[in-house]
Amino acid sequence: MNHSNTVLYLAETTITTGLAVPPVPTPVTVSEFPPFAVQEPSTTHWQNVLIEGFYFLAAVLFILGLKRMSSPVTARGGIVWAGIGMVLATLVTFLYPNLGNLGLIVIAIMVGALPAWWLAKHVAMTDMPQMIALYNGMGGGAAATIAAVELIKGTQHSLIVQTLAVLGAIIGSISFSGSIIAFAKLQSIMKKSWLFANQQLINLVLFIITLALGIFILIQGPATATVIIILFFSFALLFGILMTLPIGGADMPVVISLYNALTGLAVGFEGFVLGNAAMIIAGTVVGAAGTLLTQLMARAMNRSLGNVLFSGFGATGGQEMTEADVQGSLKPIDANDAAIMMAYAQQILIIPGYGMAVAQAQHKIWELTKALIEREVRVKFAIHPVAGRMPGHMNVLLAEAGVPYDIIYDLDEINAEFAQTDVALVIGANDVVNPIARTDPSSPIYGMPILNADKAKNVIVIKRGRGTGFSGIENLLFYADNTRMLYGDGQKMAAELLQSVKAL
Amino acid sequence: MIEGFTALYIFMLAAFTGYEVISRVPVILHTPLMSGSNFVHGIVLVGAMVALGHADTTLEKTIGFIGVILATGNAVGGYVVTERMLEMFKSSKGGTK
């Protein structure tokens, strides 16, 4: 009896790795209270089955949730499923064997949850991209801290697992500091793209130093001095900052998506370190899904990932267009005439751009749409993949105004319909309807897929003034014979159109 | 502990799953889906909890504490933001699904 108990106790110590845990009973105590000694290991086993079972359930819920989130009909349910998975996984983690610092854990969860919840509830829909960047960065940072604790503690791992810990640390740190920069840029805290001499060379050197420190940590193993580990993390964080600084605001969505994938990967790697299946599966799934999403976005923006990461936007920019290149003139129209044109049309396609959201015109536009539908005009929304600040952002903004998703079409679905369209209403969009992308190989936006608004019988452009678009390129559509310009603030013009249509 | 080829198999299968699960997503859902996948890697919270729960020295505890705060922010913020966006998607036949 005594002999078997001692064996059990030894088995226990190897699992606990001697951490700050409730005092482990000495063998003497064990033999004094045989009932407890027999029960203790079976309790741990029962806990492990419960934890692994719930992690498994959470992983299934995450995958099903993501699957549901990829169709508009089931999307809402998808996030709820994933949410249930997260709550289950978090709660069951409290049963982890020998989990200490419970008070600290609860406090940290409260400190993290309350501001995040409040901020997420109150942020405007137009600011969604930077919020995603912020929360994503936090996840990457968390993955890096897991690696930091493991490395400082010097837990003995196999070389492969140790390598994954170091890789996860680098990736997580880059994702953290990079996402913070992305957030600052989109929030306009930081306005400029920082370009300086030898930037790419400096970044390369920084990356090599980070890698070298990582390899050094691998060779030294648990004996590595804490200072080296701190230095390693500092360089990884610095690299994330400098890598993101030169990237322009227009390319940020691709970068945020990339960091999202990276965080997933880092979480997966740290999952291997902790032997945590839920983290491995959820992290890897997000890593793969995020990579695909990044590719889709980059393709929609006609940018390659390498292009986004290694050149500031505009650095490759084409030559300025002179007035002589533009044929025709800008022909203004007033709201009343535009309203008549629209009210007697059979089909209208509305092309909204980020300018519409800035002017907060989406609610008025939806009211106008409803008034036109009442007059039995077919109205559809045509969305360019980069309308808004990231692919799909415009859909969110329209959904906020109440526009149902089944009258919203994306570029591939709608482009053939412009020829049968009486009026194309362009509001707050510019480069995405510029026909120069089809015709002029010297233009920086040449080759970008555009909405063929110029093929419609009539085009009405609501625009604040005569300036050029984001890329600074003259828009040939505005000078076309079938185009009329409705100058003014988006919201005000939409209201006037609405009034005129109702008065007819 | 998950080691060696078992780990590699899990990694490979999970990667394919992630790729397949969203491969047919329409552009209109790109932003919410990115936000949703951002929420899913909030699972890092369980790892951060374990790291803090097993931390001994003040330095380890401090880093672990920051880790749990960051991970909670990722999970909670990611959920609320995604839910707010998806809540708004309605069909013209009426009703949120």
Image (cartoon, coloured by chain):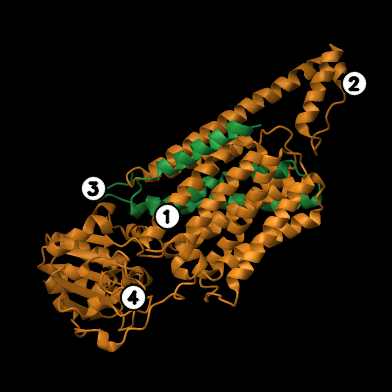
Chain colours: A orange, B green
Q: Which residue is mark 3?
A: B93
Q: Which residue is mark 1?
A: A295
Judged from this view, the residue extending furthest toward the top is A1
Comes first in the chain, label 1 or label 4: 1
Left or right: residue A460 compared with residue A39: left
Using the rendered view, name the quadrant where residue B7 is placed: top right
For label 3, the crowd category at 10 Å Cα-Cα, with few meaning under 14, some 14 to 19 and many 20 or more, is: few
Q: Is residue B18 above or below residue A227?
A: above
Disc number at residue A443?
4
Task: Check the residue under mark 4 and report the chain it is in.
Answer: A
Task: Check the residue under mark 3 and report the chain it is in.
Answer: B
Helix, strand, or loop for circle 2? Answer: helix
The number of numbered badges drawn on the structure is 4
Q: In the depicted view, which residue is nearer to us: A484 or A22?
A: A484
Whether callout 3 and callout 1 share a subunit is answered: no
Comes first in the chain, label 2 or label 1: 2
Q: Residue at x 48, y 48 (%)?
A: B37
Task: Check the residue under mark 2 and report the chain it is in.
Answer: A
